[in-house]
Image (spheres, rainbow, N blue to C red):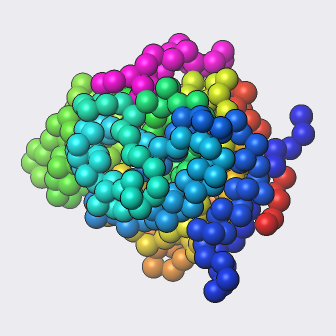
Amino acid sequence: MSASKVYFTDMRACHDESLPQKLERLVRAAGITSLPLGDAFTAIKIHFGEPGNVAFLRSAYAESLVRVLNSCGARPFLTDCSTLYPGRRKNALEHLDTAYRNGFTPYAVGCQVIIGDGLKGTDEVEVPVPAGGILKTAKIGRAVMDADVIISLNHFKAHELTGIGGAIKNIGMGCGSRAGKKDMHCDGITQVNQEKCIGCGKCAKACAHSAPVITDGKAEILADRCVGCGRCIGVCPKDAISPIWEQAAGLVDKKIAEYAAAVLDKRPHFHISLAVDISPYCDCHAANDTPIVPNVGMFASFDPVAIDRACADMVNKAPVMENSALAERRRDGLDHFTSLFPESDWHIQLDHAEKLGMGSQDYQLVVI
């Protein structure tokens, strides 16, 4: 099997070409116009950002992509599905309000915005998972499955539960309905290191299921309530919370890959990753920390496995930003993502996706 092509350009710009224009040139060079776009309902899966977080992708990038798709006669729409955790994206009304506040209005981006799993996160389709999966089916937002073409436009970053958040996670976790997200998370139950815990209660405030309880000045996670979403891990100021890996054992990563495989199976798809403002935590948080490395660049590929691997490799080659979480936690002999979250293993997700036939970790970087 030949190496998959991953197209790359850096974040340098000049007066003659803006970064959104450079993105347009990148995706055209990578072959996006070879997709069957004529009159095709084309879902652009994107994360609209949580209010208070400013690391999410700017809407100007989406506008640039929509312009390319419109020129090919496509019918594009931006989409994402509801969240499990408390925040401003747990139903379609709040989700749309958040998207608009963060600049993703139809007037700004040039296409409609549709929440993929309906008003309350319950409008889903049960889709078969390709052979080789742990799960038999995946619960995917109906609007996503109604689309003819899938395009992932994602912010590549670190992630407290899965190590990295890239194209596969954007599609897999992002396209799952609320029930689907629970299916993916439920084996990732968390635990509290009592010596580190200061009983601040931030974990309890972030949990939609009342799993953390504070007793005698210390937090405890009630296993029968925890769905494993990982929100508590990211908000803990003392890094006192971690998954119970004896139970999870990478299952969250594998299930994310299986959900992505179910979404993409037998449908045209294309993937764009921007490794910029590379935060240590997910964009689902209502705040973002200092980037762990300087901006790396923009990537495009037909292969979601290859693009995630290329992003991870290039971030790992980048210098560490001082005064960042990575600067505080880096460990000799470990890559950037494992240094940040030693309990996670980002390779599991890519290995499983490759096993499912989604793509290859062997890639050829084409610099534009």
Q: What is the x, y in percent for residue 240? A: 32, 53
Q: Is residue 88 visible?
A: yes
Q: Nearer the viewer, residue 255 or 9?
A: 9
Left or right: 110 as drawn, with respect to 83? right
In the rendered view, would you say 255 is above or below 83?
Answer: above
Q: Is residue 340 magenta?
A: no
Q: How many marks?
A: 0
Name, please, the residue furthest toward the bottom: 15
Q: Is residue 185 visible?
A: no
Q: Residue at x 30, y 24 (%)?
A: 122
Q: Residue at x 79, y 66 (%)?
A: 368
Q: What is the x, y in percent for residue 296? A: 64, 69
Q: What is the x, y in percent for residue 56? A: 43, 61
Q: Residue at x 29, y 46 (%)?
A: 95
Left or right: 329 as drawn, with respect to 351? left
Q: What is the x, y in percent for residue 15? A: 64, 86
Q: Residue at x 24, y 31 (%)?
A: 120
Left or right: 239 as drawn, with respect to 68? left
| Magenta highlight range | 122-142
Q: Nearer the viewer, residue 242 or 31?
A: 31
Quadrant of the rendered image containing residue 75: top right
Q: Is residue 133 magenta?
A: yes
In the rendered view, would you say 138 is above or below 297?
Answer: above
Left or right: 5 as drawn, with respect to 183? right
Quadrant of the rendered image containing residue 319: bottom right
Quadrant of the rendered image containing residue 64: bottom right
